[in-house]
Amino acid sequence: MSASVLVNGVAPLQLSADVVADPPVVLAPMAGITNTAFRGLCRESMASALAPGQAGGLFVSEMITTRALVERNAKTMQLIRFEADERPRSIQLYGVDPTVVGAAVRMIVDEDLADHIDLNFGCPVPKVTRKGGGSALPWRIGLFDEIVTTAVREARGNLPVTVKMRVGIDADHVTYREAGLRAQDAGVAHVALHGRTALEFYGGHADWSTIADLADLLDIPVLGNGDIWEADDAVRMVRETGCTGVVVGRGCLGRPWLFADLAAAFAGRDERVRPTLGEVATMMHRHAELLGQWLGEQRGVTEFRKHVAWYLKGFGVGGELRSALASSSSMMELDDLLARLDPAQPFPEIVLGQPRGRTTAGRSVALPEGWLDSRDSRAVPTGAELGDGGG
C-alpha cells in the first residue's frame, strides 16, 4: 500500500491487504469497452502520472454473467482474461439467482481468477432489467440481500466483494439507502452509487446529493459515479459529497489519458493532458494494437472501430476520413489513415466538460411482470439468468 495521502485528506482506498486504489479511482465496467486492452491503456496512462510506489486505481472488467461463467462459456472465459502484470484483477459479476452467483464466486476463489469481485446492481439496459437484474434488482430487497450475503460468504474472506448500484428504478421506487445498509451488513468492502435512477438512464444530470446522503449513512466507503467528465469533477465530487473515491465511466471514452489527469488532480497537481491530434493518433494505434494482441489483428481492428468517433470528437477531421477510419480492417490500413491526420492540430478545448457516450434518458424501465408488487419476495423470475458471455 502506498503511504501517500491525497489532496484534501482523501486517502487511498484499501479493500484488502492486496487490493488498494491509490488514487481512489475506479474504471467503471462498460459493456464492450473495458476489456483487457482498454484497461491496459488506462492503466498505462495513469501510471505515467503516479508517484513512485503509488499503486494506481482499480480497472474493472466488463460485466460477466454468472451463469455463463459457471458454464465456462467460451466468450466469458475470454472476457475474464487478465494480463500477467494486471494487478489487482477486478471482475464485475451480474446475476439474479443467489445459487448461481454463489457458484460463480466460489469458482473465482477456487481457481484464483480475480482479486476483487464487484456485483452489478446498476445496469439500466432493458435486456437486464426486464429479467429483474441490474438496477431493477434492489427493489426486491430480500433477493438483493440474499445475493450479496451469498457472494460475501462464498468469497470466504479471500477477496473483497463490492456493490455498484443506482438510486433506484425511478423517483417512486428509490432503493439506494436500504440496499446500501443491507450491503454493509452483508460485509461488502464498499458501495458505489451512480446518482441516477434506471429511468433516467444516462440523461440529464447525476444527482450527487444522493451520493452525499449515502456517504453520511454508511460506515463503509462510498464511491460516487456520474458526470465525471474531467479530473476536476472527480475532486469536486469528493469535496461536495464526502465520498471516499470515484468511479469513472463515459468520461474516459476516447480519452484514456483522463486517468493521468485524475492521478495529478488527486495529488493536488495542476498539469492536465491536452494531446495534439498526432498524439491522439498514437494512442489510437496503441489501442488497436492491444485489441489485436487480445483478439487477433482483424478482429481487434474491427473492435476498435467503435472508438474512432470518441477519440476524434471536436477535432477538425473530414467526414470521409472519419468514415474510413471507422471502417478499417487491418493495422496497415488503420495506420495509413492515421498518417493522414494533421499531427499538429491542438486539442479542442471546446469539448472539455462535455458529456461523452450515451446521453439519453430511458422512456420506461422494462421489468418482469409483477416485479413491483413485493419488496421482500426472493423469487427469481423464470429465465432471469442470462446465458451469454456478458459485456
Image (cartoon, rainbow, N blue to C red):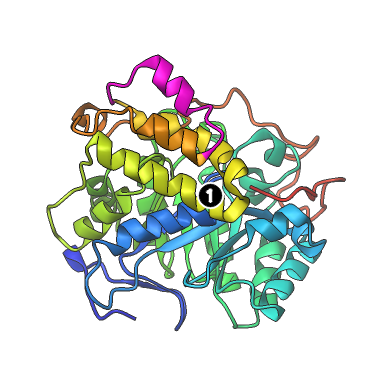
Q: Is residue 88 above or below residue 279?
A: below
Q: Is residue 318 magenta?
A: yes
Q: Which residue is mark 1?
A: 291
Quadrant of residue 120 in the image?
A: bottom right
In this rendering, does residue 307 appear at all?
no
SS at mark 1?
helix
Quadrant where the image shows the N terminus: bottom left
Q: Residue furthest right?
A: 382
The structure residue drawn at horizontal position 80% and vertical position 65%, both measured from the top left corner, is 99
Query: Relative to residue 161, is residue 341 drawn left or right?
Result: left
Quadrant of residue 378 in the image?
A: bottom right
Q: Is residue 18 above or below residue 104?
A: below
* Front position in the image: 218 or 348: 348
Query: Relative to residue 102, is residue 266 drawn left or right?
Result: left
Q: Is residue 184 above or below residue 347?
A: below
The magenta region covers 315-330
Query: Relative to residue 190, is residue 245 drawn left or right?
Result: left
**Marker count (numbered):** 1
The structure residue drawn at horizontal position 65% and vertical position 43%, both measured from the top left corner, is 136
Quadrant of residue 72 in the image?
A: bottom right
* Front position in the image: 40 or 147: 40
Type of the residue with mark 1: Leu
